[in-house]
Image (cartoon, grey):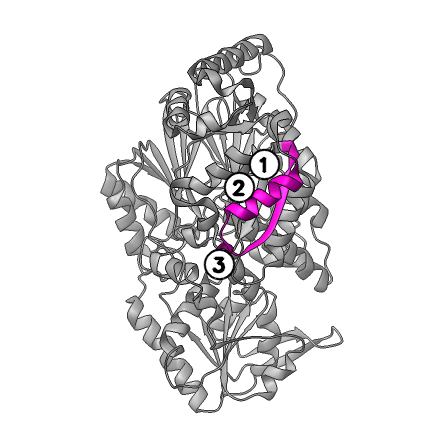
Amino acid sequence: MEEKKPGMNGNGNGSAKQHSEELFKKIEGMLPNDVGFVKAEFEGPDIVVYVKNPRKVYEDDFVIRNIAASIKKKLIVRSDSASLMAPEKALEIIKQLIPAEAVISNIKFVPEFCEVYIDALKPGLVIGKGGSTLKAIASQTNWTPKALRTPTMQSDTITRIRQLIFNESEFRKKFLTGVGKSINKPIMKSEWLKATALGGFREVGRSSLLLETPHSKVIIDCGLSPEPSVKGVGANQNGENEAFPYLDSANLSINELDAIVITHAHMDHIGFIPYLFKFGYNGPVYCTPPTRDLAALLLNDYIKLVQRSGGTPLYDEKDVRKMLLHMIPREYNEVTNITDELKLTYHNAGHILGSATVHLHVGEGMYNIVHTGDMKYGFTRLFDSATVKYPRIDAIFTESTYGGPNDITPNRRDSELELVETIRRTVQNGGKVLIPLFAVGRSQEIMLVLESMFGESKEAIPVWMDGMIVEASAIHTAYPEYLKEGVRNRILNNRSPFESEIFEVVKGEREQVFEKGPGVILASGGMMNGGASVEYFRRLADNEKNSLVFVGYNSSNSLGRRLQNGLSEVALPDENGHLAPIKVKMNVKTVEGFSGHSDRRQLLNFVDNLRPKPRSVFTMHGEEQKCEDLARVLGKILHAESRAPMNLDSIRLK
């Protein structure tokens, strides 16, 4: 990452260096005398302390806690590289200390970080009660252990990402050190704070918000619009760009960006980020750990989808890998400095795995922002509801996908019964039910519903899964701590609902599904702009015995929305790539209530339960009328300033 010139942030390199030296001196003074302090250094937003005798630190947990509380940063203690035990001998000790029941799948030593990565099916046994096993490993080998969860289902995505991070450890070390130096400076007082809408305002798609102070520039989300992104192009009939955020209109140079903050891994929030790396961005990208893995899955799938459709992707897998190497994962409730004046804290958003609302603390109490991303404040089988308690809120940017006055979803129990009844009726009639799904989120939610309804019954209704759904479900099993307690406990006890016997993975040719009898097909491609769902639809559409059931959002120009609106004939490419007309005779049905977005009532309840109350409200991520209407209503409820900004609007917040 390109370092800013001296004085850009109001303090030169000299004062920054002095600040660092004073901070490290303070840390050294708070450590026990016999730990053998070697050095301290910045590593991304964290501080790493290297010592010769880490055992003295592990014997007293309060040492690290007290120092971290005093410096208000995450502190990591590692052994000095000269003190590390030889990996071969350390490996023997590690295997002796960890019980066989942990089911270790991999152990890798990373000298650049003086760490050892331990992949296990039951990482809790690697950690031990109160961290006892980790402490024993560190004390006896001087390597700092990191426990990683092996997914209960095979995940090629997670395997590749962990291998990439391991292979590029040297690069990661240099990158994180550079980021750490750039953000750990004395906090300067900013005179103003500005937000600019770069995409996703009065529309759904290409979500992006630029936040600026005199010293910092940060983007929250940077996505693509759903329809043009599938084709790999971004211009409408008038030559206007409808797919990409308005970065080129913000008078913003890529190298001026301090950080990118991601709320979650859907393409309308992440799809443009590898393009920035392709054209020179080299800074940090913050996200939760599951978001990193899901982003890799969805971005690489986008590349393949565009190539299969005959288009040209905006970027290739090399650019995605570059993005992954610049990602800095942070957990919920972990306060992180992302510039010298901006503190980021992620909170649960309840939308998809790892989705987060963003809380940004600007300066020393100057201003506080909450950005909801996409969030769900209501019942789902997968996640707890979005967080409503924050330290402070001056302004909130809230999604409005279902913010219109008529966007009231039915009772969830009624929705589940309606879905099950539709399935039963179609199957009894000898037909198949096609449910197009977003691979991440809605797929797993519907799987839980079907597993609950049919998993232990005597109804022999097969459920076929095709597309990215299987891989996305595997990633869910690597992060049970992000799921609702009941689902989490089942995964931890090797009873993952995503591996129920009612689910059959489609392998090889899809012809096998058509040759079999009635059943349910869960296929990726929720809006039917591409993916497995379109392939099944082509074969099933002209049979009135079959049913097409939508359970999620369809954008205004998607094939899914047109089918919902009663489209009776559609032209789709045949095996030779030529467009062929297809009659739509199958029953097309929409079952509301399964969305990962909050409906109108839930949005109002979310804001009503926010603590504390914001003074300003800005609506986004919704069709124009819904954003405007929700802004008016929220303004009245909160007695606050409220607006539905347009793309390219700039708002002075402070």
Q: How many other residues sit within 10 Å of disc 2, few (<14), some (14-19) or many (≥20)?
A: some
Which one is earlier in the sequence, the residue at label 1 or at label 2?
1
The kind of residue on which mark 1 rests is Glu
Measured along the vertical axis of the image, is residue 312 above or below residue 507?
Answer: above
Tell me which corner region of the image, top left, top right, bottom left or bottom right, holds residue 372: top left
Residue found at x 39% / y 50%: 375
Residue at the outermost bottom position: 429
The residue wearing badge 2 is 146
Q: Tag 3, which secondary structure? A: helix
The kind of residue on which mark 2 rests is Lys
Q: Nearer the viewer, residue 7 or 519?
A: 519
Magenta residue check for 431? no
Q: Nearer the viewer, residue 529 or 382?
A: 382
- Quadrant where the image shows the N terminus: top right
Q: Tag 2, which secondary structure? A: strand
Residue found at x 45% / y 25%: 56
Measured along the vertical axis of the image, is residue 42 above or below residue 94?
Answer: above
Q: Nearer the viewer, residue 545 or 115?
A: 115
Q: Position of residue 415 (x, y in %)?
A: 33, 71
The residue wearing badge 1 is 115
The kind of residue on which mark 3 rests is Thr
Q: Position of residue 289 (x, y in %)?
A: 51, 45
Q: How many other residues sit within 10 Å of disc 3, few (<14), some (14-19) or many (≥20)?
A: many
**In the image, which is nearer the foreground, mark 3 or mark 1?**
1
The residue wearing badge 3 is 477
* Alpha-carbon span between mark 2 and mark 3: 18 Å
Q: Tag 1, which secondary structure? A: strand
Dot 1 and dot 2 residues touching (CB under 8 Å): yes
Magenta residue check for 99? yes
Q: Position of residue 574 (x, y in %)?
A: 70, 77
* Alpha-carbon span between mark 3 and mark 1: 24 Å
| Horizontal side, residue 528 vs residue 26: left or right | right
